[in-house]
Amino acid sequence: MGSVNDNKLRFCIDRGGTFTDVYAEIPGQPDGRVLKLLSVDPSNYDDAPVEGIRRILEEFTGKKISRASKIPTDKIEWIRMGTTVATNALLERKGERIALCVTRGFRDLLQIGNQARPKIFDLTVSKPSNLYEEVIEVDERVELARDNEDSSSSPSLVKGISGEMVRVVKPIDVETLKPLLQGLLKKGISCLAVVLMHSYTYPQHEVAVASVAENLGFRHVSLSSALTPMVRAVPRGLTASVDAYLTPVIKEYLTGFMSKFDEGVEKVNVLFMQSDGGLAPESRFSGHKAVLSGPAGGVVGYSQTLFGLETEKPLIGFDMGGTSTDVSRYAGTYEQVLETQIAGTIIQAPQLDISTVAAGGGSKLKFQFGSFRVGPESVGAHPGPVCYRKGGELAVTDANLVLGYVIPDYFPPIFGPNEDEPLDIKATRDKFANLSSQINSYRKSQDPSAKDMTVEDIALGFVNVANETMCRPIRQLTEMKGHETRNHALACFGGAGPQHACAIARSLGMKEVLVHRFCGILSAYGMGLADVVEDAQEPYSAVYSLKSVEEASHREATLLNQVKKKLHDQGFKDENMTTETYLNLRYEGTDTSIMVKKRISEDGRGCNYDIDFVELFQQEYGFKLLNRNILICDVRVRGEGVTNILKPLPLESTSCSPKIEGNYKVYFGSGWLETPLYKLEKLGYGHIIPGPAIIMNGNSTVIVEPNCKAIITKYGNIRIEIDSTPSTVKVADKVANVVQLSIFNHRFMGIAEQMGRTLQRTSISTNIKERLDFSCALFGPDGGLVANAPHVPVHLGAMSSTVRWQINYWGDNLNEGDVLVTNHPCAGGSHLPDITVVTPVFDKGRLVFFVASRGHHAEIGGITPGSMPPFSKSIWEEGAAIKAFKLVEKGIFQEDGIIQLLRFPCSDELVQKIPGTRRIQDNLSDLRAQVAANQRGITLIKELIEQYGLDTVQAYMTYVQLNAEEAVREMLKSVAARVLSQSASSGDQSSVTIEEEDYMDDGSVIHLKLTIDSVKGEANFDFSGTSPEVYGNWNAPEAVTAAAVIYCLRCLVDVDIPLNQGCLAPVKIYIPPGSFLSPSDKAAVVGGNVLTSQRITDVVLTAFQACACSQGCMNNLTFGDNTFGYYETIGGGSGAGPTWDGTSGVQCHMTNTRMTDPEIFEQRYPVLLHKFGLRENSGGVGYHRGGDGLVREIEFKRPIVVSILSERRVHAPRGLKGGKDGARGANFLITKDKRRVYLGGKNTVDLQSGEILQILTPGGGGWGSPR
């Protein structure tokens, strides 16, 4: 391997979705040969990579090679290829027919996943379809032994691969399995994915399944334990499904590819790019490692040719294509992740950390509700943008064409019906002219003195919005990991990227852009720079210590031998191999693990993994966890066979002046500028090109903006120096600039999102870090909501009440460095576990903004562990209640004060002592994380003020609210028109009134009289007639009702508008004081946030006739004792709608928190999960069926206190328009003597070891009369 044969050709190929790029090294030609082909062109050839090789071989040999004959291989040394075959099959759901084999009780495990819905405002709850067609359940069960169990006294215990002790509760029944597998074969399914509980440490049962299946004739079996032997059944099972689904497709393609060559192909070294940036031979190229094959080539390409050679700065890879943009980072080593989500499916395998954003050259351009919108929808390759002459819609490519960023003279004439015409600039300008009439008409309606925007202004506006859309993921990628974006260089490639590079770098504060000379085919070129990679990993569960590290080193040695053998088998010698060893470590009690690479010190000894882990953890998450055990999870060895094939060749410096090929008019912010055009191949090392300029780099257009300077480097690449600071915008007197409005929407929302990522990153509790039960938001100086990242719906808009209460309470007594904390319902809170941290933002001594973060703390005190007592009757019984306290005062953290408030909460009137928090250290850690999240928001706001000026930022704070208000008004007008059109009344057509009500399980009624003004687009939500405060805990503070209303309005708008105070501007909400939606400050409220909020949502959506009722509950389960507490909410069925069936087993409406993985659940807590699946036929029947609820059966392995707080156990979720109701929920206790005892909707029970809790969650209502 790695040898050089000067007489043979080397091929690097990237088979993309639209184009196939070929780079060939040809003897005697130092620059190589570049070829670009359509990936699919059946009228001319069967396979693009084969066609590319055929054409170049013909050129090289001068001999005609018929398409019908085999490709001769005597002149080919090697072929390296990346392919989107796997990605496309996954996206288009065109993989192999497969079945899933799971442990009995878990047939729906992968469909449920983490139970969160992908888009919280999507009432249809669209989830990706399952990859498998059939499921078979295996009668087997393995459970983890408890820590105190002794293997010598329990002969049924065996040691798993991870070192954990396991008990085989039920050995696998092979004879029962055989007919199930035979039944699949009869249905034509011969590929199988297998995931059994705890197979990561005890794979024997999975191996037995594979043995039976292969003997029966199954073509392919993917075992989760073999692919990713890591704890967590859901991602492991999804990975196995992806592998079973894709590997046969890949094998079929590869077999077809190899068959196109003559018999000498066996001597040709053919390798394929994997998602981790390494190459693999055909025999080892499998589905779950192939999904990022193409993008991985690009990362290898820019990292190996630019970092260290062209710059010492860390690089941000920016690969902009037609439908999406890939963003990555490189700072000397490949940044990898072990888990990612692609096409809605989680894949657990080592892969490069590549973020994809739905913005590219084909992103649609729209003007909606007074602002410019780019994407996420794409015009696709067919019909494509307007300029493609196929009747398409306006896209980013069209805007670039109008501005002169795309030069038609340098584009091949491949457009139109016959694919023989140039780009159509006239049709594009005409479309923009039509859009300009709409935009200018709107602007005149807002301000009669507004000047008309030209076609060019509008095109540039859309490009600026597109740039900001792409800046967001770049900021997130870098700053989420603790890196400053501005300290990077932008490595730009892909067809469209170099047109946008200068503007994006400027917006991000970067000073340097690098464009590789092969930027248009860099993914293909990267194939020739990659090494062959072999990976081996096994689980090892132990507390980090000298003894466990010694055991890990033994395991490392075994894995090292496995990896080396695989590389030896491929022809590598020891001197051409490098290996790396990793331990996957995490802190005890957290789910956040880090792969820590073994460092070798100067004296040749290995460094301590734990020291490196603590440093890495602090760099990424901003803190250390003191006095906390470090746990080993996995041992991993990665081996590379170094190939050293493609080497960048330095150029001789040039003394001649750069040649101008022509001059073209290009539109920049200041207007049209005469701009010289250069061809890169005619430029030499040392040439300096001042902006504005156009450099044609093959098929890619590089735009060098004014005040920038392009330099041709020693290796023939382009370095662009960005001299100017980001452009500012002056605020208009009366109305918002429609372009800046969209950009500020992105910036404000980006601030809230980054606050959320900081909170998730720096928190330690499962609730915040893994279940994502938190929200972050940005507010104006009056407390009005500016931007709320869409985290948990029940928090939406609700924090505005909290901030305003604090403003009124503290008045002028707020100083820079103060941070406020509150959780009391009467102070705008929801329920006590949701603690809100509020920080005022000052600019030159003036209060200009507020930022706030709200997180659910799993323990806040109260009469039951977990602080969600089912029987609380007053606020005091629910834990510590804080109206107002300065958590940080003038920069000093008030630890003693907050500990006092949390540990010794107020008691009730009877002076009954109420327990304080049982996890004070977790509370303090998460409160510090909330302070850090707020501080991140402050930093970003100050950057925005520095860039644009305070007046402009505050003006657009108002404008984004007005923009959201307009969207809601338009929605209300359309709803009123729809209702009036369906009404037989011929009376007043200016308003419509609808009354709706629903009941809590105790009979309390929520009554709504909704009046909509169809002319003004205003709505009055009048809850008069709602029952009074209840002697229970499902009273809901007023903020909860406001959150429910704003959530419903945002769902009904169905456009990606920012979530802010403007949504409520056209709305009046009246809640009768003293009702259970506006209770006294002594009322218990813990259930109002999690139960009543769901009923309010059902009532509002039913009034709008939007959809049938969803499960209407969060099914809150808490259990624990004096040593621990656990909390979860359980999904159910969503309601059907006019055009959709409800979704089964999903979080509905006011929550979207995740479910703990079953293996983690059993590993961490004294439980055995008997069943977690869909509750069949619990969804309401209708023309469209409601979604089914869930069944969850938990056996407790030691005495424990269990609390259930649920609704819809008496009143069923209602159907709509003739649809039937969904099934009511139910909670049961199954005692040791097998009695099944009904617990009701709300209860606390002391369970004994061996007793089982069974929870049946409600289904969603149906829509329309059954067919």
Image (cartoon, helix red, strand yellow):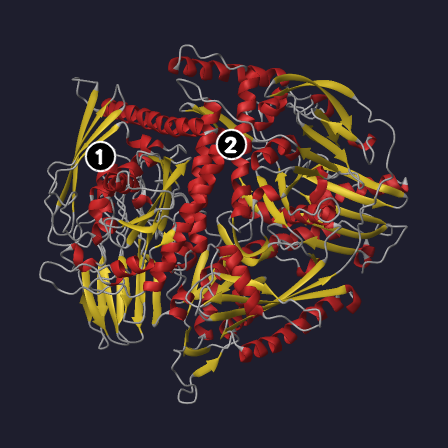
Q: Is residue 490 above or below residue 268?
A: above
Q: Is residue 70 above or below residue 182?
A: above
Q: Which mark is residue 947?
A: 2
Q: Residue at x 55, y 24 (%)?
A: 392
Residue 739 x %, y %: 48, 24
In the rendered view of the protein, which quadrant contains the C terminus?
A: top left
Q: Residues within 10 Å of mark 2 (few under 14, many from 20)?
A: some
Tell me, yes or no, whether the two marked residues, 1 and 2, touch with CB atoms within 8 Å: no
Q: Farthest residue toward the bottom? A: 152
Please state if 1206 lies on the left or on the right of 628 as rendered.
left
Taking depth in this image into account, of 872 and 1202 the one nearest to the observer is: 872
- Of marks 1 and 2, which one's residue comes earlier in the chain? 2
Please state if 411 lies on the left or on the right of 203 as rendered.
right
Determine which quarter of the picture holds residue 590: bottom left
Q: CA distance from mark 1 to mark 2?
A: 45 Å
Please state if 687 lies on the left or on the right of 1078 as rendered.
right
Q: Residues within 10 Å of mark 1 (few under 14, many from 20)?
A: some
Q: Which mark is residue 143?
A: none
- Looking at the rendered structure, the secondary structure element under dot 2 is helix
Report the amino acid beneath label 1: Ala
Residue that mark 1 sits on = 1103
In the rendered view of the protein, which quadrant contains the N terminus?
A: bottom right
Residue 769 x %, y %: 41, 56
